[in-house]
């Protein structure tokens, strides 16, 4: 995009708008947050890439949590979930500086997988605090936890692939339109 400020504004707007999309009714784990964090890491410089998605998550968790029955919207696993989304930002920074469909798809797969591993380890670990009695606190309990969560990983992957593609696609479309308008203005 020719205008850096306009490019940054588009990226910030798309990130915030997509992250707020978690407030819209959706299938379990099919949300724009993972893709939004990946996009932010790729297209927004500095600390703002981390701050925007994190601020949206912290602000909307009480709303989403109340709708799902969580007390106050925050859980034992909230810090791990936030950290996992910050890893998505980092993945965007490292893997998607140069955008291609393959890079975005591979990064979305990595984002979904690390989220699956970290969040479900936390579900299993919650048993150690006595907050859950779903799984035994041994290796077979951990394997059982991961096995039970595989359908959710598939949904997370579908959401991350779809929303990442949509965000990077919308951004490219905006870039083309801005470039075309700039060319018409200078011609």
Image (tube, rainbow, N blue to C red):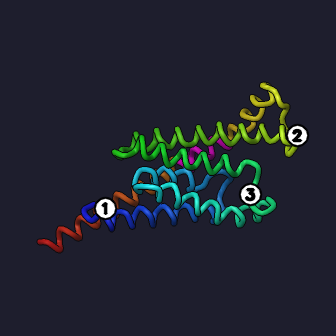
Residue at image point 23% right, 70% down: 181
The x, y position of residue 43, in whole percent, is 40, 54
Outermost residue, front side: 47
Q: Mark 2 or mark 3: which is in front?
A: 3
Q: Which residue is mark 3?
A: 74
* Element class at badge 3: loop
Figure quadrant of residue 3? bottom left
Lateral position of residue 130 relative to residue 181, left or right: right
User: Mark 2 or 3 closer to N-term?
Assistant: 3
- Against 138, is 98 above or below? below
Residues packed near mark 3 inside 10 Å, few (<14), some (14 to 19) or many (20 plus): some
Quadrant (top left/top right/bottom left/bottom right) for the N terminus: bottom left
Foreground: 150 or 33?
A: 33
Q: CA distance from mark 2 to mark 3?
A: 19 Å
Foreground: 154 or 3?
A: 3
The x, y position of residue 166, in whole percent, is 45, 56
Residue at image point 34% right, 45% down: 98
User: Mark 1 or 3 closer to N-term?
Assistant: 3
Q: Are marks 2 and 3 in contact (CB under 8 Å)?
A: no
The x, y position of residue 34, in whole percent, is 55, 51
Instruction: In the rendered structure, find residue 175 and report the number of the disc placed on it.
Output: 1
């Amino acid at each position: 995009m020719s205008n850096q400020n306009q490019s940054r504004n588009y990226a910030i707007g798309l990130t915030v708008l997509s992250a707020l999309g978690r407030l819209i009714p959706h299938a379990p784990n099919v949300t724009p947050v993972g893709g939004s964090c990946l996009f932010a890491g790729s297209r927004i410089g500095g600390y703002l890439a981390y701050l925007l998605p994190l601020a949206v998550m912290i602000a909307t968790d009480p709303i989403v949590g109340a709708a799902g029955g969580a007390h106050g919207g925050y859980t034992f696993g909230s810090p791990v979930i936030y950290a996992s989304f910050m890893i998505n930002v980092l993945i965007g920074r490292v893997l998607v500086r140069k955008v291609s469909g393959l890079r975005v798809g591979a990064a979305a797969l990595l984002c979904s997988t690390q989220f699956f591993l970290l969040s479900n380890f936390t579900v299993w670990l919650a048993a150690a605090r006595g907050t859950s009695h779903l799984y035994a606190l041994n290796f077979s309990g951990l394997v059982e936890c991961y096995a039970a969560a595989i359908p959710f990983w598939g949904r997370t992957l579908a959401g991350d692939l779809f929303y990442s593609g949509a965000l990077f696609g919308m951004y490219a479309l905006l870039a083309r339109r801005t470039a075309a308008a700039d060319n018409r203005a200078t011609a």
